[in-house]
Amino acid sequence: MLTNNFTLLISLRFVLLLIAQVLIFNDLGFWGFINPMIYVLFVYWYPLRSNRSVFLVLSFLLGFTIDVFSDTLAMHATALLTITFLRPLIMRFTFGAAVELQAFTFKNTTRLQRISFLAILIFVHHTIFYSLEILSFSHFLLILKKILFIGIASLILSILTSSLFADNKE
């Protein structure tokens, strides 16, 4: 029964983040160029002790589906799959050696650590995404501008969304 609840929760988050990203956040256009990417929350919310292969496949499918609707040539899939693969490393960097313990949960961490973890996920994702999108060193400042402004907007909306919909158990 517990496995079915986790499967239902993961499926629901997958679908809702996909719909929110494609229908709402891809077309926001704050200041003409800021379209937050909150689907990174999928990587943040995914259960810690779950099957890593399934996690990689689901992350690819989420990114690829957003690419199909956004016409972005697998840039979302590449960026999301990369942060999914790097998640254990980012978690060890953010939370320390406690991540290796079987009893580790997000409940045992500070809010600052959780926000730092989310911020690193978002900024690594955005660095990969906008580097692939622009693909030119001559536009380095444009890449930095997009990473910074869209990253901050994504972080703020992700924190708000996370505080509203996060599972209290972990």
Image: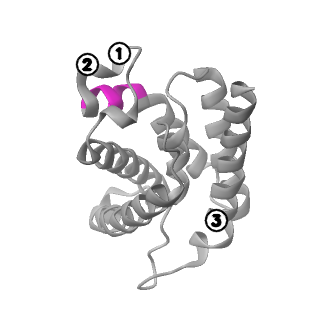
* CA distance for labels 2 and 1: 6 Å
C-alpha span from label 3 to label 2? 35 Å
Q: Residues within 10 Å of mark 1 (few under 14, many from 20)?
A: few
Kind of residue at badge 1: Glu
Residue behind mark 3: 20
| Residue 76 is covered by the magenta coloring | no
Q: Which residues are magenta?
A: 88-93
Q: Position of residue 154 (x, y in %)?
A: 42, 63
Left or right: 58 in relation to 115 = right
**Camera-side residue of 30 and 67:** 30
Left or right, 90 with respect to 76, comes to left
Location of mark 2 (residue): 97
Q: Which residue is mark 1?
A: 100
Total number of numbered discs in the rendering: 3
For numbered disc 1, what is the local secondary structure? helix
**Residue 97 locus on image (x, y percent):** 25, 18
Asked where in the image residue 157 lies, by quadrant, the reply is bottom left
Q: Which residue sits at x=39%, y=58%?
A: 136
Q: Amino acid at mark 3?
A: Ala
